Image (spheres, rainbow, N blue to C red):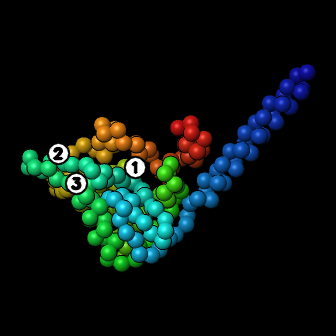
Amino acid sequence: MGFSRRARDVGVAAAILALTALIVARLEGETGQTITGIARAADGDTLTLEGHRIRLLGMDTPEMMQLCKRDGVDWRCGVAARSRLAEFLRAGPVTCRTRGKDKYDRWLARCETAASGDLGERMVREGLAVAYGDYEDEEQFAKAERKGLWGSEFDLPQQWRRMNGRPQEVAHEGERGVIDGILARLGLD
């Protein structure tokens, strides 16, 4: 009886490992794609490129309806973020390297243009985005120079979404470890 119980435990462990391997293979299959072309800004951290919706990794921007205050006056900081991203995208073709998808089925990617370089880095450095898993040095620069958001009164985008009943943006799977990615896929994060 001890042998059959042990064989069953080994079988269950093997099945779990096989399932884990399949999930990891699926997650890895969603990474590494490069997409190049002319893009347009959907908001400050999302763009449309070759029919794909792409969420920029490592940063977060105010929502389109979000207001900030500069010198006591309302400032449409979400619209300003989208406008600046649109300016970068008008400079020419963009190249995005994907790292998976988020819960909204958007590609998560790092994107750049020849004229502007890394778009996430530029948005954070100019103070129109906050660091969200990356770009901490650029955020410190923007804070020190009081650029964009850092020269105003504002709620972090995550806080604003929470206070206004908007869906929360969770950590991007492309920034998580393999185990976290598996848990997210299974809805256990």
Q: Nearer the viewer, residue 2 or 55?
A: 55
Q: Amino acid at mark 1?
A: Gly
* Mark 1, residue position: 133
Q: Earlier in the sequence, mark 3 or mark 2?
A: 3
Q: Secondary structure at mark 3?
A: helix
The N terminus is located in which quarter?
top right
Q: CA separation, marks 3 and 2?
A: 10 Å
Is residue 38 visible to the viewer in this orientation of the structure?
A: yes
Q: CA separation, marks 2 and 1?
A: 22 Å
Q: Position of residue 144 (x, y in %)?
A: 18, 52
Foreground disc of the pair 3, 1: 3
Residue 151, labelled with which disc?
Answer: none
Q: Position of residue 45 (x, y in %)?
A: 36, 58
Q: Nearer the viewer, residue 106 or 97?
A: 106
* Mark 2, residue position: 153
Which residue corresponds to the image point at 40% horizontal and 64% vertical from the top-left? 47
Q: Earlier in the sequence, mark 3 or mark 1?
A: 3
Position of residue 60 relative to residue 123, above or below, is above
Q: Residues within 10 Å of mark 2 (few under 14, many from 20)?
A: some
* Mark 3, residue position: 77
Q: Amino acid at mark 2?
A: Glu
Q: Residues within 10 Å of mark 1 (few under 14, many from 20)?
A: some
